[in-house]
Each structure stands twice: as C-alpha cells, then as structure tokens.
C-alpha cells in the first residue's frame, strides 16, 4: 500500500535550506508533512524547522544521491544542484519535482532561450556567444549562461567603456528592450495536469543590486494583458510538462508586447505576498502540486505590496535590525525575517508585505516601511 503524505514515515526532501525552504516548511506543517533538508550551511534558515536537517553539498553527486534515495518526493529551492544525481534518483523511482531535465534546462540561460524559440514562446531576440561581446553588438543585455543568481551574472552594456567590465566565457546577448513594466506570473501544475496561475504582479527593481525591491499585487495592467500573461505562463509550463511551481518573469514592452524574460521552477520572490494576500500561498500551492493534490484557489483577497529587506551597503557582519518596533505597530504591515545571522550589502534578509484595500495606500505605506527599516551589522 502506497504511503500517504500525512503518514509519519512519509519523507519529502528539499535541496536547499534557505528562506524559500523555511516558508515552505511553515505551510507543510499544516498538512503534517515531514520535510528533510540538505544544505551546506549548518545555520541555514531551515536548520531549526526541518524534521531532518543534513549538512552537505547539494552540488555533490554522492551527497545528493544518498540524501535523495530515502525520500518519497524530492524538490528544490535553488536551481544550482547536481542534476545527474537527480536523474539517477528519478530512474530509481524517487519522485523528483521539478523533473531533473527541467532543472538542467533552467541552469543554462542559453538553453532557456533556445527552448522559447523552439516552442514558439515570445521572448527577446538573442545570440549565444563564447567570448566577450564586440562594440558593434552594443547596446545589449549580457547574461552568463550558467551560475547567475539574485541579479548576479546579468548586466546592460551600452558603450565601449562598458565592455571593459563585460563577462568572459559563454553568454547570452539579448536585445535591449524598451520596457514599460516587468511582471511575473506564477503557475502551478500537478501530475494530473491540473494547472492554476496566480494573478500577475508588477516588479520594481533596485538599480544598484538588480534585485526586486518592490512588488505590487495586482499588476496595474489591462484585463486583456492579464489574460495574455496568464496564457503565456501556461504555455511555458505545459511546453515544459512541469510538475510543481513555475515563476514566469515577463517584460511588457512600450509597444504593448509581452516577452518571457526568465523562468524559475520553484517558489519565487515574486510570490511572497501570497502568504497574506491570496487565498492560497505559493508555498502551499507548490506542496499541493508536487504531492499531486488538488490545486488551491489563487485569487487575490486584498491588494498587497511586498518589499525585499536588503542588507545596507557598507555593512557586513552579525545582523541587527533598526526600526523594527515601529513597523510592527503598523496595521497591515507583515514582517518576515529569514533567520540569516550575517548581513551583507544587498543580501536578502527578509521581506515585508503591506496589505490594504487600496493599492495606492499600500504603496505609500510600503515606501515608508522601506525607509523605516534598516539592516545593518552590529
């Protein structure tokens, strides 16, 4: 008789023990799901919450194999993991979601772009190169094919002077698009093929760190564009045949065209607001999808703004938070601290979700909250 997800000996494993895993565990507890974590850091955010916590390198073949073979279902919270070990586990009967070949595709931005092209998915024009770009190719967006994460490995090159800082090695060169907005749609798909999407959100980036600074839900775009974005996200998910959650980041160009920028096959920064603002959080939805359970209702209950809490420039060391008491007194302001003990410039240390019946009011409150809270070293 097959084990049920709520059985005491059922084991769900995650490669990665950061904040995404921490928020996932907080939802999994509601369903009595035992979550095991593999992470290289002994004091990772998940270390105090997991049913089982193993310190180890999720890029090491044997470590991943030994960890995964005791799991009933294995998932990820970071893409930079050993795919060959996951393929072996899948072949041996472990349910691995997202599927290893999808993770392998996501690890290489060049393969991602070729996938969009092959499957008729709208994306910006691109070229794959092995070396530094040339002056006659400017202006362009340059992306390292492998290893980029949280804004690293991506830069805009406009002038010949910028070429001095160009990445060397295999890269994707993308057309520099005139963008009106950047939006994201998170889509979930289970083994039965059931698909649900979260309403589109709008993203505002920190220009220095190239990280999302503010997220606005719902996105301020037309109803027709919301439908188009939803359909585009579903097209990507079904072309991949993915099981699990998929974040689809898109550009809305000044010409009104929607283009897929990048995708992430996991819970994502652009879905954190769903904990307070939507009927089902992205973390519960990922749990439902990889356990082949009915997918939850995704509609917005209340408008929201999410703010990433980033380490202040010039501060590295043991963390302290300035202004936290004042924020916690403010109705509608929800603070999530990730439990990282050390801060660095622009490191994600937590997030704030501001909810209000009026999105413009929420935006004003969020910008005040951003100024009020400072993450500094002791």
Image (cartoon, helix red, strand yellow):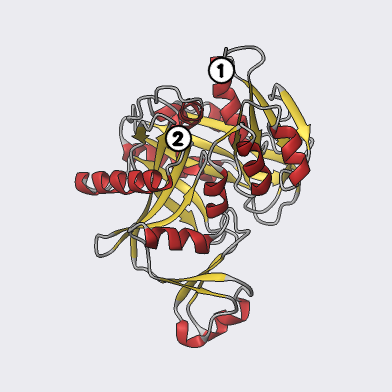
Is residue 265 visible to us here?
yes
At mark 2, the secondary structure is: loop
- Residue 5 is labelled as 1
Give neighbour class at mark 2: few <14, some 14-19, many 20+ (Cα, 10 Å): many
Q: In terms of depth relative to the viewer, which is nearer, 254 or 266? A: 266
x then y, percent, for residue 116:
40, 58
| Place of residue 212 in the rendered image (x, y in percent of width and height, measured from the top left) | 49, 50
Mark in front: 2 vs 1:
1
Density class for disc 1 (Cα within 10 Å; few <14, some 14-19, many ≥20) is some
* Label 1 secondary element: loop
Q: Is residue 258 left or right of residue 184?
A: left
In the rendered structure, find residue 233 and report the number of the disc placed on it.
Answer: none
Q: Which residue is mark 2?
A: 273
Exactly how many numbered labels are in the figure? 2
201 relative to 274, above or below: below
Residue at image coords 28%, 45%: 231
Task: Give the image quarter of residue 350.
Answer: top right
- Quarter the N terminus occupies: top right
Please tell me in which quadrant of the rendered image residue 122 appears: bottom left
Q: Looking at this view, is 76 or 199 the one in front?
A: 76
Residue ID at (62%, 31%): 22
Using residue 55 as the reference point, say whether residue 246 is left or right of it. Answer: left
Q: Quadrant of the C terminus?
A: top right
Q: Position of residue 285 (x, y in %)?
A: 45, 29
Tell me which numbered mark, 2 or 1, is placed earlier along the sequence.
Answer: 1
**Nearest the eye: 367 or 78:** 78
Q: State the CA–CA distance, disc 2 to disc 1.
A: 26 Å
Q: Is residue 267 above or below residue 255?
A: above
């Amino acid at each position: 008789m097959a084990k049920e997800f709520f059985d005491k000996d059922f084991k769900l494993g995650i490669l990665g023990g950061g904040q995404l895993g921490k928020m996932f565990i907080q939802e999994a507890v509601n369903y009595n799901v035992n979550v095991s974590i593999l992470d290289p850091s002994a004091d990772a955010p998940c270390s105090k919450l997991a049913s089982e916590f193993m310190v180890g390198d999720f890029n090491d073949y044997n470590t991943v194999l030994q960890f995964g073979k005791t799991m009933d279902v294995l998932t990820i919270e970071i893409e930079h993991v050993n795919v060959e070990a996951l393929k072996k586990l899948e072949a041996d009967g472990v349910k691995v979601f997202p599927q290893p070949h999808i993770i392998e595709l996501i690890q290489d931005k060049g393969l991602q772009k070729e996938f969009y092209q092959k499957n008729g998915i709208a994306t910006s024009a691109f070229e794959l190169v092995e070396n530094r770009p040339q002056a006659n190719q400017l202006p362009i967006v340059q992306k390292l094919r492998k290893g980029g994460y949280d804004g690293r490995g991506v830069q805009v090159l406009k002038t010949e002077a910028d070429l001095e800082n160009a990445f060397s090695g295999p890269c994707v060169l993308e057309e520099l698009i005139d963008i009106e907005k950047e939006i994201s749609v998170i889509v979930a798909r289970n083994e039965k093929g059931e698909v649900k999407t979260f309403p589109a959100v709008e993203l505002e980036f920190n220009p220095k760190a190239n990280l999302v600074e503010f997220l606005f839900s719902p996105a301020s775009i037309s109803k027709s564009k919301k439908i188009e974005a939803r359909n585009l996200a579903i097209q990507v998910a079904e072309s991949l045949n993915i099981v699990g959650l998929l974040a689809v980041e898109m550009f809305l160009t000044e010409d009104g065209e929607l283009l897929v920028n990048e995708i992430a096959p996991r819970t994502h920064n652009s879905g954190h607001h769903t904990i307070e603002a939507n009927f089902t959080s992205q973390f519960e939805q990922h749990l439902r999808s990889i356990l082949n359970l009915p997918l939850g209702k995704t509609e917005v209950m209340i408008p929201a703004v999410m703010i990433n809490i980033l380490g202040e420039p010039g501060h590295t060391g043991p963390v302290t938070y300035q202004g936290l008491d004042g924020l916690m007194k403010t109705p509608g302001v929800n603070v999530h601290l990730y439990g990282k003990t050390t801060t660095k410039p622009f490191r994600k240390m937590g997030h704030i979700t501001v909810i209000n019946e009026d999105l413009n009011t929420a935006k004003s409150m969020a910008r005040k909250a951003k100024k009020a809270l400072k993450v500094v070293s002791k």
